[in-house]
Image (tube, rainbow, N blue to C red):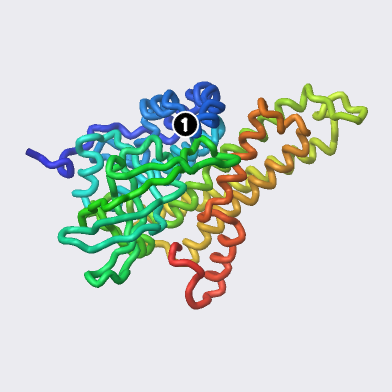
């Protein structure tokens, strides 16, 4: 019998445009469920089912398991399109697709564990090694707690950081482990001002055995050394840290676009209070604010698109980007956050205090963007420091995650 590796893919891979169109067709449903998702602190199951049926969680899954194995550009554009409807839902889509991509870096045996019997399995993850491990025959026994595990309500597996130790218990590497969700405990810890529906809770391991084939070296992955035997699969040759940084920046673009759309649409009927203007649209100052906000959103899009196209091109060519290129991708991700934050703040000033009404979706996008923009991968000032250090050819950057 042919193995899953040898079996030819029968899945027809849709275009990016088709996947984005599928998402936009779901906008009414995702928008309808957004408030419920905030209240429940998890994406509504109706939305998860609809996204699953639309194959949105298949974007970064290998074709060998029925996935679409699309480009990083596809992940970015789809995430931004989901965020136009709801930032929290987009965050879950983003992280599940990114963790599926990470799973594609593991040996085939580990990928079989995840997808062979359940090709629709979803993966969440936290790469921080906030755990302890003990070397045993055939693997490790792991104990730990991983916070901010986005999509925790909807995952079947998790990719989790762990120390790789020797027989004496000394840490010799930073590992990433694939662990079934059923082997992990769970604690609700995600009580926040924004991204409420992302379900970024805590997963807990108590004496969980992880076999060797389900552990890879994080530093090696950051440097382009992956464990998959399928080196012909272009997507999994993509540079690790740029993929993750640009991925978590993508929802920002969708939220910025949506706030711009909402404020612009309302301008034709909303008065500019305490002025002689009957509508905001008549005001030269308001027009200037709208134009500047639109340019800021465009700037974010241009940097994001440039960066993902460079990552995709390097993967196609089988070239691992150098430190300057990888640092620039981190800077591009931070630049997206900085420009979208400025655009949304400007649009809220232009729109007025009504934008903060609890029934106004603008304030939800503002809160979601503000919380997501503080993710450690995309903090603008830190990202710029990384890029500046690489440009100046200083000895060693400020992080190994580059």
Residue that lies at the very extreme toward the bottom in this rendered image: 395
Q: Considering only vertical position in the picture, is 174 above or below 365?
A: below
Q: In the figure, is residue 94 to the left or right of 63?
A: right
Q: In the figure, is residue 363 to the left or right of 132?
A: right
Q: Where is mark 1, residue-wise?
A: 43
Label 1 crowding class (10 Å Cα cut-off): few <14, some 14-19, many 20+? many
Residue that lies at the very extreme toward the right in this rendered image: 276
Q: Nearer the viewer, residue 68 or 43?
A: 43
Would residue 74 be visible to someone looking at this image? no
Pinpoint residue 42: horizontal percent, then vertical percent.
47, 33
Q: In the figure, is residue 229 to the left or right of 143?
A: left
- Point out the image quarter for the C terminus: bottom left
Pinpoint residue 257: horizontal percent, then vertical percent.
62, 36
Q: Considering only vertical position in the picture, is 200 above or below 316?
A: above
- Point out the image quarter for the N terminus: top left
Residue 120, by quadrant, is top left
How many numbered circles does the render carry? Answer: 1
Pinpoint residue 62: horizontal percent, then vertical percent.
29, 42
Q: Nearer the viewer, residue 3 or 312?
A: 3
Q: In the figure, is residue 278 to the left or right of 74?
A: right
Residue 391, by quadrant, is bottom right
Q: Nearer the viewer, residue 174 or 288?
A: 174
Q: Provide the secondary structure element on which disc 1 rests.
A: loop
Picture residue at 30% right of the left edge, 36% below the top: 121
Picture residue at 65% right of the left edge, 46% below the top: 341
Would residue 238 be visible to someone looking at this image? yes
Pinpoint residue 119: horizontal percent, then vertical percent.
26, 35
């Amino acid at each position: 019998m042919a193995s899953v590796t040898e079996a030819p893919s029968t899945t027809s891979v849709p275009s990016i445009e088709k996947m984005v169109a599928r998402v936009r067709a779901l906008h009414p449903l995702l928008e309808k469920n957004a408030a419920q998702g905030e209240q429940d602190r998890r994406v509504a199951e109706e939305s998860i089912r609809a996204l699953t049926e639309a194959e949105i969680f298949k974007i970064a899954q290998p074709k060998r398991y029925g996935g679409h194995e699309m480009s990083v550009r596809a992940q970015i554009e789809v995430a931004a399109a989901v965020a136009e409807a709801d930032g929290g839902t987009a965050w879950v889509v983003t992280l599940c697709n990114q963790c599926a991509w990470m799973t594609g870096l593991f040996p085939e045996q580990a990928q079989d564990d995840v997808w062979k019997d359940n090709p629709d399995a979803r993966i969440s993850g936290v790469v921080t090694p906030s755990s302890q491990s003990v070397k045993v025959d055939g693997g490790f026994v792991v104990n730990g707690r991983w916070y901010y595990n986005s999509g925790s309500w909807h995952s079947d597996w998790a990719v989790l950081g762990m120390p790789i130790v020797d027989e004496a218990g000394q840490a010799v590497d930073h590992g990433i482990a694939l662990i079934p969700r059923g082997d992990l405990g769970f604690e609700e810890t995600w009580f926040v001002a924004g991204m409420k529906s992302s379900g970024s809770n805590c997963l807990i391991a108590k004496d969980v055995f992880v076999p060797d084939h389900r552990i890879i070296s994080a530093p090696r992955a950051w440097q382009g050394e992956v464990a998959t035997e399928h080196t012909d699969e272009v997507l999994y040759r993509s540079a690790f840290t740029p993929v993750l940084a640009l991925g978590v920046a993508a929802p920002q673009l969708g939220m910025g676009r949506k706030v711009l759309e909402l404020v612009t649409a309302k301008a034709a009927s909303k008065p500019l209070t305490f002025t002689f203007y009957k509508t905001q649209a008549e005001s030269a100052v308001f027009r200037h604010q709208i134009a500047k906000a639109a340019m800021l959103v465009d700037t974010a899009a241009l940097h994001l698109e440039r960066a993902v196209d460079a990552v995709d091109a390097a993967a196609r060519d089988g070239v691992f980007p150098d430190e300057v290129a990888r640092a620039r991708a981190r800077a591009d991700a931070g630049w997206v956050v900085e420009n979208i934050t400025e655009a949304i703040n400007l649009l809220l000033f232009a729109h007025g205090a009504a934008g903060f009404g609890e029934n106004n979706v603008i304030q939800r996008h503002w809160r979601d963007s503000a919380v997501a923009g503080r993710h450690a991968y995309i903090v603008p000032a830190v990202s710029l420091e990384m890029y500046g250090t690489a440009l100046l050819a200083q000895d060693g950057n400020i992080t190994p995650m580059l």
